Amino acid sequence: MTLDHRFDHRLVLTTYAQTARTAHGTLTELDQLSGDGDFGDNLREGLDQVETALRERPDEAAFAVAANVFLDEVGGTSGPLIGLLFQEIARALSATDDARDGWRAGVTEGLAAIQRVGEAEPGDRTMVDALVPARDALAAGEGFAATARAALSGARATAAVRARRGRAAYVGDRALGAPDPGAMGVALLFWSLAEVAEP
Ligand code: ADP
Ligand code: MG
Ligand code: MG
């Protein structure tokens, strides 16, 4: 199968923004169960700001613009961590014409950066639990749709674990049975990518 390596990464981000608006209520409820309830706002408002910034800076690489917004403007623990992911995706995409290569390298480096900063391990009930299966799927040469399914099932599996990192670590069993909001939110990035790249 051939991939069109020129598909528009702006469209990936605007699709992600639309998805985050649709998922806002669910993500808010999940963070109310396991944290302070602001994850839906953080992701939706961050991606709304990305859309605005993309309109203002049409000549810059889309994920570099998104990284700037998340690193500089978005609050919560998730804002800077997702900013690091976007930054590594931007860097990797700029180094290759092959989107799948770029995503494989970018997610690998982005996950490493998130773990350097946040020190979460797989199974700690964080966005790392969506990123590890996504990275593994990309490293195995899977397409974007399979990668999105891997990320989503990794995110869903967090419902069975007690948090050891982030605010959810303090709420004990309250969040058991509901997935981690950050893991679900990051899975939606891969879902948006698959929708644009493998429609
Ligand atoms: P806050 O807890 O500061 O309100 P957010 O609500 O924006 O932050 O984001 C919460 C999400 O951040 C969690 O659901 C989890 O996925 C992620 N997270 C929290 N701590 C870490 C960490 N140390 N490493 C990776 N991700 C983390
Ligand atoms: Mg929160
Ligand atoms: Mg908060």
Image: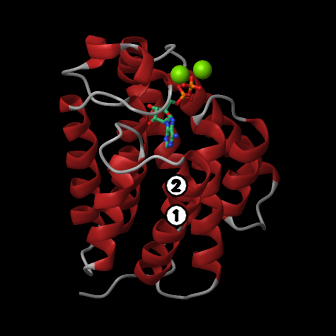
Residue carrying label 2: 115
Q: Amino acid at mark 1?
A: Ala
Q: Position of residue 88 (x, y in %)?
A: 61, 67
Q: Between 13 and 159, which is closer to the camera in this rendering?
A: 159
Label 1 secondary element: helix
Side (left or right) of 3 relative to 6: left
Mark 2 and mark 1 in contact (Cβ < 8 Å)? yes
Q: How many marks?
A: 2
Instruction: Work out which quarter of the rendered image holds the C terminus and state it.
Output: bottom left
Where 161 sits versus 101, above or below? above
Label 2 secondary element: helix
Residue at point 49%, 14% (across, down): 37
Side (left or right) of 71 relative to 126: right
Residue 25, picture quadrant: top left
Where 59 sits versus 22, above or below? below
Q: Position of residue 135 (x, y in %)?
A: 36, 67
Residue 158, picture quadrant: top left
Where 38 sits versus 126, above or below? above
Label 2 near ligand 1 (CB < 8 Å): yes
Q: Between 8 and 151, which is closer to the camera in this rendering?
A: 151
Side (left or right) of 91 relative to 190: right
Q: Which mark is residue 112?
A: 1
Q: Amino acid at mark 2?
A: Gln
Residue at point 58%, 57% (across, down): 116
Q: Position of residue 104 (x, y in %)?
A: 42, 75
